[in-house]
Amino acid sequence: MRILVTGGAGFIGSHLIDRLMEQGHDVICLDNFFTGNKRNILTWMDHPYFELIRHDVTEPIRLEVDQIYHLACPASPVHYQYNPVKTIKTNVIGTMNMLGLAKRVKARFLIASTSEVYGDPDVHPQTEEYRGNVNCIGPRSCYDEGKRVAETLAFDYHHQNNVDIRVARIFNSLTGDQPVIYYQGDRLYCESFADCYDRIHQDISDISVPCFDSQANMVLKPISAIWKHKVTKTGYEITTTWGKRVKITEDHSLFTRDENGLPKPVFGKDLQVGDDVAVPTHLPFIDKSLEPFYITDKISGTGVSICPEDVVPYLEQYRKPIYNYLQQKGISSRQHFSHLKKYEAGNRIPLELWQHLGLPITPKECIATASSAKRVNNYIEDIEALLWFLGFYLAEGCLVYRQTGDYQLLFSSNLKYLEKLVAVCRSLFGCECEIRWDEASNKAPCVRLRSKIIVDLVVNSFGFGKNLSTEKDIPNWILQLPKQQLVHFLHGFWQGDGNHDAKTTGSRLILNSSSPAIIEKLVLILAKFGIVGSVSEFYTTASKSNPKQYKSYRLTVQGLDRYEILSLADSKQTLQAKTTNHLAWAKVKEISAFEIDDFVYDFSVPEGENFIGGTYGVCCHNTYGPRMLENDGRVVSNFVVQALQGIPLTVYGDGSQTRSFCYVSDLVEGLIRLMNGDYIGPVNLGNPGEYTILELAEKIQQMINPDAQIEFKPLPQDDPRQRQPDITKAKHYLGWQPTVPLDRGLELMIQDFRDRHSST
């Protein structure tokens, strides 16, 4: 679609152009640069679908377009009062020219009106039916009355000439199954975009994602929004080198290489087989090492007892407190002695009683369950051995649970690695187990580790399953281990997977699994080392006697200078593909179109403009940026600039007048929905959250410079006392409401202004 945006180099217009370009439209930006700035649209200057025309809308122009977003007009008091006659002419003559153009070419016309049409309202909040309270000869009337006439013109052209119009009254201003990676605080999550949205959309204040910066280096940056849209359109599943896949809408972008080798966005519908697409070779992680611990600090203490070397001295020294404890538990006094004898016979004291007595837990005590004579070391000191054990279990272990209370971890693998497993279980947990193998039966050798405590630790506490589930996955905390620990987990997985020595010595590293979730996490783990692996599918049989085939997944790594897993932290990879810092250029192997009639999702990442999504990790695009003028005289920018400059924040009147603040990304979404919907309007687009001017000043003061002063000055003429939109119609007709909280929007704007100040 060919779309004209008047005032397109301005604050809102430039963000609107970003979204329209992202959706694949041909966009014409019309601006006289009175308040607009070329830097706001610099990204699109050389794009074949973008055209910039320096032109004043008060003069006619002839163009061929399908839609017109008419945003041209100074919007802040400083600018529209600078030349009030020019402001009136822009609103009246400029709007007539654009409506005349829409009439001639049969384009749909959207006018960005304003909450100023309500003047200083007597009705609160303001609905679209309210006719306002405007001073027609005051200092603000060039803008207020100008916009009222502009709305009148739009409806007159609609009624008289059948011009298809939309009227927005602006107050202050991938598919869901795709995996995404993000942090909430310092905790890593890898889950579907739909699950991500459900988890975080109500509070994004501490969410960050891995993305590449301007030099194509991977970094972590905070998001400023998460989007969820219902769409009916074409989507594309893109498959690339190394088996990476991502499903995107036709108007969403991946990244290809520009003439300088740096990433530039390309729409999904424009991708061709053979094109280069950016994928990460390295991912940044927030490391959390696993330190030595007591098992009793990790698992539920129910049914667990402490086993000291000799329980008798404890029973004698604490006899009376033990009796008191038993009495509190409802055990009759005649049974107290029998309980003590039971503790003595089993040489154990229930953990709850041990803690009740205030006894310290030290590395020398073992633990056991009431139903088992098998003791387990409580203190786990050798973390490297533990991680090897967990990796080994993930590769070739499984959970066996019988209702009789027989909890087992069953391992089946190569004989020499099972021998290592037996030794690790002995030194790590203090558990004896043996290898069972009948060569005549043609069954693989196996080891059974019977211990409810160890099962609970591995499956439930460490997350290698949930509630004794037999389904396995790599828990996210594993990905956050430092590389020095992570190699031991990978080593255990590789050895549990079988004997690859003959296949991989000096040529490649292979990791196999029947679980795509496990392989996906392994891809992310390797990216922590700056290593790219290739994923493929294959089929295998469970045994020679069972011909049924099962799908499995293989992760293959080539090009390493060192293939020893324990040395991966020092390994370097040479890829048979072009690279740019932390990005590799994967070739598009296959593009499959499909129809979407569902919700789709997107992140907004200021300064990053991308995030990692899809199966095995692909760089996906988004665009976002504040760009508000510093000298526009509006209350938010005034306060931010004053606080940054260390001068008093100016509050007019007593600061009790109220405003609502809608972040620009929310506003752009509302404009696009209105333009492409069936409802003409007018529709209020704004944030119903209401703040006094003094509250806003104090909030910005605390965010930037708590020592800044606040000074009060007389209230200007016709300054509205209240401003709050009723967005009932926006919700009903557009399915729209703002999503970015005020604090988050202020953080982004403050950072943008701070960056501009530092650059000058």
Image: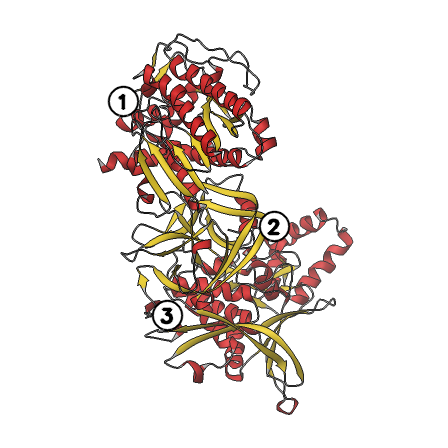
| SS under mark 2 | helix
- In the image, what residue type sits under mark 3? Leu
> Are circles 3 and 1 on residues that touch, CB within 8 Å?
no
Query: On the rendered structure, is 757 left or right of 657?
Result: left
Residue that badge 1 annotates: 647
Alpha carbon separation for disc pair 1 and 2: 60 Å
Toward the viewer: 113 or 151? 151
Return the disc, 1 or 2, that comes first in the chain's sequence. 2
Residue that numbered label 3 is attached to: 568
**Residue position marked by numbered label 2 in the rendering:** 356
The residue at the point 26 percent across, 27 percent down is 645
Q: Earlier in the sequence, mark 3 or mark 1?
A: 3
Real-space Cα distance between discs 3 and 1?
Answer: 54 Å
Give the label on residue 258, or none. Answer: none
156 w.r.t. 532: above or below: above
Residue 135 in the image: state x and y as whole percent: 44, 8
Q: Residues within 10 Å of mark 2 (few under 14, many from 20)?
A: few
Task: Identify the amino acid type marked 1.
Answer: Ile
